[in-house]
Amino acid sequence: MISKIEKMVIIPAKRRCVSITRDEAIFIYNFLRERKITETLEIGFAYGYSAIYIMSATGAPHIVIDPYQGEFDNLGISNVKKLHLYKRLIFYPDYSQIILPKLVLSGKKFAFVFIDGGHRFDDIFIDFYYSDLLLRMGGFIIFHDLVFKSTQLVAAWIKYNRHDYKFIHTSRGNLIIVQKCSVDNRAGNHFADFCLSPDLKNKFHNLVSKIGALLKISPKSIFLS
Ligand SMILES: C[S@@+](CC[C@H](N)C(=O)[O-])C[C@H]1O[C@@H](n2cnc3c(N)ncnc32)[C@H](O)[C@@H]1O
């Protein structure tokens, strides 16, 4: 299946970095298969690369939200069609902040959410907020792009404020995985100050150093202060 996907999917070479890497896609594929997860939701579709791996892993319907498919020349949809997965794709061509509350109202629940939509802090935070309401107990959320400080801060907020979530270790430096393990029983006015935790800071430093080495530039010049 993996070689078929790699052969069939079209992503313009210059835009390859928009999608997750092949290694990350295979990691998510195995993650879902090992856990026999079938109820999946994804925010951020682009060329459909991650969606195709998710759908191939589960053999089940997959809900995807993205308002900008036109900006990707509808290649995401056409990639999914080429792999004969279109019947299982439930695609909402709209903003996650509009669709996610509607899914909550509908009573739908998921065992897995992949958050890779807008990458501003507020985009990611809102995507997490609603994904949490949609997630089954024991369910997982994977965030892409720990390389961005916005993603790191959402992860740090979860770490310090959401003790109902457990962080799952992954060697994939640009992914964060959390699992909902208990009930959110914070008081109505609860707030724990958050900043980058030492382990997230470490993970980020390692990632930035690797990128710096690859690009042959000083990590300092790409490090976000
Ligand atoms: C990094 S790309 C997703 C890549 C895809 N997950 C993959 O690996 O194949 C981010 C996507 O998020 C979408 N996006 C941006 N803002 C969004 C929003 N508010 N709601 C849903 N999707 C959004 C963009 O249109 C873009 O397609």
Image (cartoon, rainbow, N blue to C red):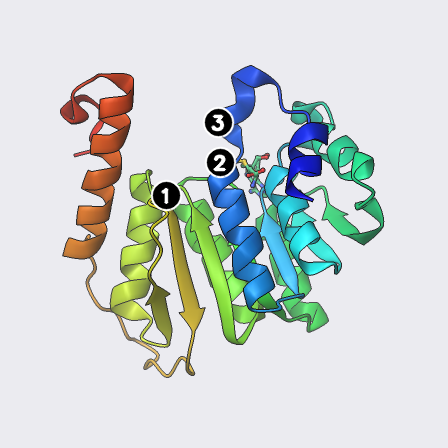
Q: Which mark is residue 17?
A: 3
Q: Where is residue 18 in the image (x, y as percent from the top left)?
A: 52, 29
| Amino acid on which disc 3 is placed | Cys
Quarter of the image with the N terminus is top right
Quarter of the image with the C terminus is top left
Q: Please tell me whether mark 3 sits on a helix, a strand or a loop.
A: helix
Check mark 3 vs ligand 1: CB closer than 8 Å? yes or no: no
Question: In this rendering, would 85 be left or right of 19?
Answer: right
| Amino acid on which disc 1 is placed | Asn
The alpha-carbon separation of the residues under discs 1 and 3 comes to: 13 Å
Does label 1 or label 2 sit earlier along the sequence?
2
Q: Please tell me whether mark 2 sits on a helix, a strand or a loop.
A: loop
Of 157 and 178, nearer the camera is: 178
Q: What residue sits 70% from the left and 33% below the top?
A: 76
Question: In this rendering, would 223 be left or right of 11?
Answer: left
Q: Please tell me whether mark 1 sits on a helix, a strand or a loop.
A: loop
Q: Where is residue 105 in the image (x, y as percent from the top left)?
A: 67, 69
Check mark 2 vs ligand 1: CB closer than 8 Å? yes or no: no
Rendering quarter of residue 166: bottom left
The vertical placement of 168 against 88, above or below, is below
- The residue mark sitting in front, 1 or 2, is 2
Q: Determine the quadrant in which ligand 1 lies.
A: top right
Contact, CB < 8 Å: mark 1 with mark 2?
A: yes
Q: Visible in this render: residue 48?
A: no
Of 90 and 99, nearer the camera is: 90
Q: Which residue matches tag 2?
A: 21
Q: What residue sits 71% from the left and 23% below the top?
A: 73
Q: What residue sits 33% from the left and 51% below the top?
A: 171
